[in-house]
Amino acid sequence: MTASRVRLTAALLALALGACAGPARERVDGWSGVGAGETVVVGRIELVPQLRKEEQRIDALNSGSFENLVYLMADDKNRVLKDEPKTADYDGRIEATLERTFFVRSSDHPFYILGGVLWLEIGRGQNKAYFPGGLRVPVKSGDKAVYVGTVRYYRDEFWNFSKVTIVDDYDRANAEYRKKFGTKIPLRKALLTPVK
Amino acid sequence: MKKRIWLVLCSLALAASAGCASSGHERNINDPTNSLVFGFVDMDDAPTSISYASIQQVAPPTEEPYWHLSVRKGMFYSVYLPTGSYQLSSFGGSGFFAGEHRYNFPRQGNQTALRIDRPGIYFLGSFKYKTEKSGMFEVGKFSMQKVNKPTEAELLKRILDEGSGVKDSAWRDRIQARLKQIK
């Protein structure tokens, strides 16, 4: 295998995520993309300290698909991810841009955040940071829009996570929600809860 | 508790290895803010020995985070590192039958993580390469198991004897002082 092939391999592995994994929960900006029996899930992922530009080295054609993006693995059933997540684990993921509120379409059933992946390096090698999961998204049947909170991950420079908190930043999220979705349907607050 | 890390083994052309480990850092060996960082890896069970190694600066942020390490028969070291946070990034080497290999360390859960708060001498440890099981279509995996030999003192003596320019630098007194301390 040559140097260029290693680069290619890493890039291909990254591309494979998009090509082979099932779809993510779709991002939505208005009610037109939301069907009956579906809910808009609103939340946010933050890192403390924030991700620095130099910490992510993405040398791939579709680098924008990875920069500042955490892949949150989600499933209807809670389970513990062991070792490297499989391609199937990415099905129904939430693609959350760090420090920005996400709005994704989901069924109106509760689900679980199993963990997260952030690509740190694609190109010279490939390296990822793995985020802890174990969070329940308490969507209820009939919910149309649910605010789940800001997940704040505290970490050090070696990507050891020391603490995870769920922060209630409803006012800010609701203001963004109302701009996109209007005021007809209220945003219900249902913060993420740690799985016991 | 035995601590293990999973690492990814990749094959790579030698041409690339030389370029990748580019230090891009110009520092004087006698700079009093330098630290000596060193360690050892026993590659007897690996496909190849190592001929190059790099350590990554993870803090403070920098555009050139990779520092080249000198490698001598399993021993790796740098006498130029400024204060900051580091961890081993990769090793590489070649064998007649095995070809070129590069051994990558993960950014997260890396057991060689090191914070240098003030200039000094930092021993990362001695390790033994161990091949780990991986699937037929997966890249190779290995772990690094901590071992007791060679000791810090043995390696420091080797750096003094074999390190390029070390004996004739300010490092001689610093290493000898450290050797007295750990006797």
Image: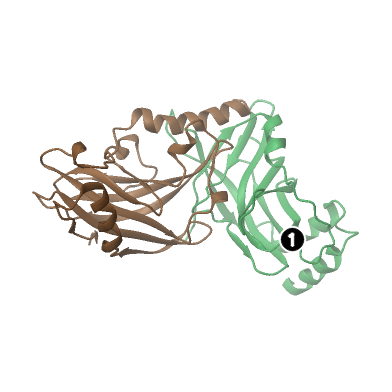
| Left or right: B117, with B139 as reference point | right
Q: Residue furthest left?
A: A142
Q: Which residue is mark 1?
A: B36
Which kind of residue does numbered mark 1 sit on?
A: Leu
Q: Looking at the picture, does residue A28 appear above or below residue B84? A: above
Residue B46 in sight from this viewpoint: no
Chain appearing in brown on the rendered image: A
The quarter of the rendered structure image containing the C terminus of chain A is bottom left
The residue at the point 62 percent across, 57 percent down is B86
Chain B hue?
green
Q: Position of residue B35 (x, y in %)?
A: 74, 62
| Of residues A53 and A15, the one drawn nearer to the viewer in this rendering | A53
Badge 1 density bin: few <14, some 14–19, many ≥20, Cα 10 Å: many
Q: Position of residue B60 (x, y in %)?
A: 62, 59
Q: Chain of mark 1?
A: B
| Left or right: A192, with B73 as reference point | left
